[in-house]
Image (cartoon, rainbow, N blue to C red):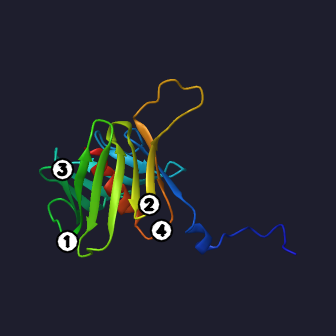
Amino acid sequence: MADSDTPYHPDLEDLRRIPVDLFASKKLPGLSSGDLGFADSSENLVFIIRKSSSSLKSLLDSSGVPLFSISRLHNGMWELHKGDIEKRKELVLTAKRTSNKFSKTELKVSFAGESSQHLVIKGCPFQKSCTIYSQDSIVAQTSLMYKLRQIYVGRSKFRLTIFPGSIDHSLVVAMVAMFLQG
């Protein structure tokens, strides 16, 4: 019989099977003007998207260290490199717009050096809603923050749910940033 005074410590393997929610907003504490922040459920800043120009963005961790640089190329193409914008290191992935209709956009994401693994992002950037698919499973999903009895849903805050799997959370945030860029 377990002692009731003993604190419960969940198994780390169990924690890896739980979806993670990140909440995105431009109005989180500690953000500069124009930054988009991703915070956990305790409102701790986890990732920051900083816009450098109309075609360049950086993904930073909570302490401001650059993780990835996002470059928007011509004709609906994006590249994601490790490191900051000035010192772009190795190419991590590329994304190409495969469909762009008024209410639906689709991107195909290919990882550098891996011709077999592709991700597909489908959704509507205007509504800040998208789903990232890996073959037949969902990797992550965004949705606006609805409240009960709310007639108008603001687009300034949205939720990113990352489902358990093998893709790094920072890569998922970078892919969402590419999708929202149009």
Residue at point 36% right, 50% down?
122
From the image, tell me which residue sits under label 4.
165
Say what secondary structure mark 4 lies in. Answer: loop
Label whose residue precedes the other's in the sequence (4 or 2): 2
As rendered, which of 55 and 42 lies closer to the eye? 55
**Image-based side of 6 in relation to 158, left or right:** right
From the image, tell me which residue sits under label 1.
90
Mark 2: few/some/many CA within 10 Å (<14, 14-19, 20+): many
Q: Amino acid at mark 4?
A: Gly
Q: Is residue 69 visible?
A: yes
**Image-based side of 12 in relation to 85, left or right:** right
Label whose residue precedes the other's in the sequence (2 or 1): 1
Please state the horizontal and vertical placement of residue 173, each as a whole percent of the image: 36, 55
Q: Which mark is residue 76?
A: 3
From the image, tell me which residue sits under label 2.
139
Q: CA distance from mark 4 to mark 2?
A: 7 Å
Please state the horizontal and vertical placement of residue 95, each as a whole percent of the image: 24, 58
Q: Amino acid at mark 3?
A: Gly
